[in-house]
Amino acid sequence: MPPDTSIVYTPRSEASQSIRVIRPASLSLTDLAGHVQSLTRHAGLIYTLSEHRIRVRYKQSMLGVTWAIVQPVALMAMYTMIFSFVAHIQTNGIPYPIFVFTGLVPWTYFSTALTAGTSALVSHSNLITKVYFPREILPLTYVIVGLFDFLIASSLLAGLILISRVPVNANILYVLPVIAIMTMFVIAMVLILSATQVRFRDVGLGMPLLLQIWMFATPIVYPLSAVAKLPRPLGWLYRVNPMVGMIENFRRTVLQGMAPDFAILCAPMVVTTVLLPVAYLYFKRVESTAADVI
Amino acid sequence: MIDLRFDRVSKRYLIPHEAENHGSSHPWMRKLRSLWRTPREFWAVREVSFEVKRGEALGIIGHNGAGKSTILKLLASITAPSAGEITINGRAAALIEVGSGFHPELTGRENVYLSGSILGMPRNEIGQKIESIIDFAEIREFIDIPVKRYSSGMYVRLGFAIAAHLEPEILLLDEVLAVGDMAFQRKCLDRVRALRQAGRTIVFISHDLNAVEALCDRVLLMQRGEVIADGPPGEVIGQYKALSTKGTTSPFSGIGPVREWRDLDVRGDRVVRLRRVRVCGEDGATMSAVDIRHPVGIEIT
């Protein structure tokens, strides 16, 4: 091997200073700003990792990006079969396939981001024990990939809406804040679940079951009006589910051209504002020893 | 100027009780019980304090389990200390494993971006350096095929080429130089030397005492989580060697490179008598440690 002179290291200037102090992990709200700041410094890594996830996913598959719509479309076909032929569900005059697809698109975003994000730390244990970067980047990139798939599925939804001539008005712009709240909520969830999974793998194992129950506890295959008469404790529980307000309002603004129902959007907004900072602090707390137990 | 400071840093690992088998109880009960029991503690690093000046190359040596790697993980922020304070002044990069963050499905070029970003290189900087990285790794023809088809040598070369282009202000190295063939190892060492000459601070952990001696200005010797010696390489390495021979329980313990017998208890008879056995080097001087790269002689008198 010839001696190489390809890299010349520039001498380090005496003046350069960027002092960092590492202390035992603590739980305080004041740390939050620092965490966010260090996260923004890693924006490039977030971008590269998300891009890489999308690339890898489609690298050895024939259908490529179309996989992003296969799941909601297949589920749409299945639920249409069950709920418009076997059991009849009233959807206020909206064709059932479009009705259910409008619920499935945001739900698929939520459930895929949650499933993948939850195992983000555990599936990268080799990185976590060898290199440092803010660990929340790992679950975050899965949320970003979910958002990417969501955009692809949404364009199909837009096509369906155009073809079936569902009237659309300016209220459709309300989907943006709804999706923003949903994204914040899913980030909070993956932070908590991925951190918990470091110690208890049960979280990942229970995830499919949890999501299945959660899906039927959310107005996706049926309209919200169908559950108006739930008996007391169940009805209360139902309203606490933050996904109810988000999915229902997504459908309201997209299909019915109405302004969001803020009464049911309250629960997800409150839950998310409280949960996100708490989840982040909890995650950072676990992060400090994650490399030891993972 | 001080680049790294450890101030009474300790690191505790918790070893959970395994669900022990207490006769008749149900496995679930045992699992539950192990959750409540306070786990056993293991202090990998105890109250360690040291400072590294800017431009200094510090070596850390010690037996397996002495806490060397834990120190490096603490410096690299991979794990947080249980007590004490670590101050780092500058951009630190840890090289604990070559090829960290490689994804098998991605091509070499894509992996340079991926691994480079994970190791903390900004994207535009990777763009500028990618050609130089490919040349350094000597894999230009294969750069656009997935790394899962790489030979292990190519994989390691690419990994190190990325690391060599990191230009950290503080470089943390853990035994990574022990990969690749001799020529590549030499190339890696040259790179570390070049970084040193550019005034970068280096912390180097290794069992390769020759490399430590050649590279470092100062060496810490660790034992059971504590620093037991701190000084110039020659001195500390000597102490470490003494420690190593003392602790062994081999049948040869306590035997130095020379053994002589006085006339009375000597073995043999009137014709042949064993007086002295000695291990010596090429030049005939007595050697206490054997370097396998040089000829060794055994003199029997």
Image (spheres, coloured by chain):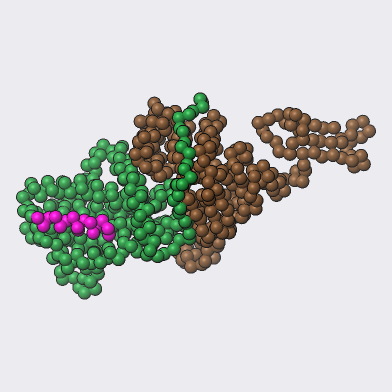
Horizontal and vertical percent for residue A275? 31, 64
Would residue A42 appear left or right of B266 to someone viewing this image? left
Q: Residue at x 69, y 47 (%)?
A: B239
Q: Give the magenta range.
A: A170-185
Of all chains in the rendering, the one displayed in green is A
Chain B's colour?
brown
Closer to the camera, A231 or A264? A264
- Specify whether residue A164 is in view: yes
Would residue A264 appear left or right of B58 to someone viewing this image? left
Does the magenta-highlighted stretch encompass residue B110? no
What predominant SS class does the magenta segment belong to? Answer: helix
Horizontal and vertical percent for residue B93? 46, 45
Q: Residue at x 44, y 42 (%)?
A: B100
Residue B42 against residue B118 in the figure, above or below = below
Q: Residue at x 48, y 54 (%)?
A: B79
Would residue A234 appear left or right of B145 to someone viewing this image? left
Does the magenta-highlighted stretch encompass residue A183? yes
> Residue B136's image quarter?
top left
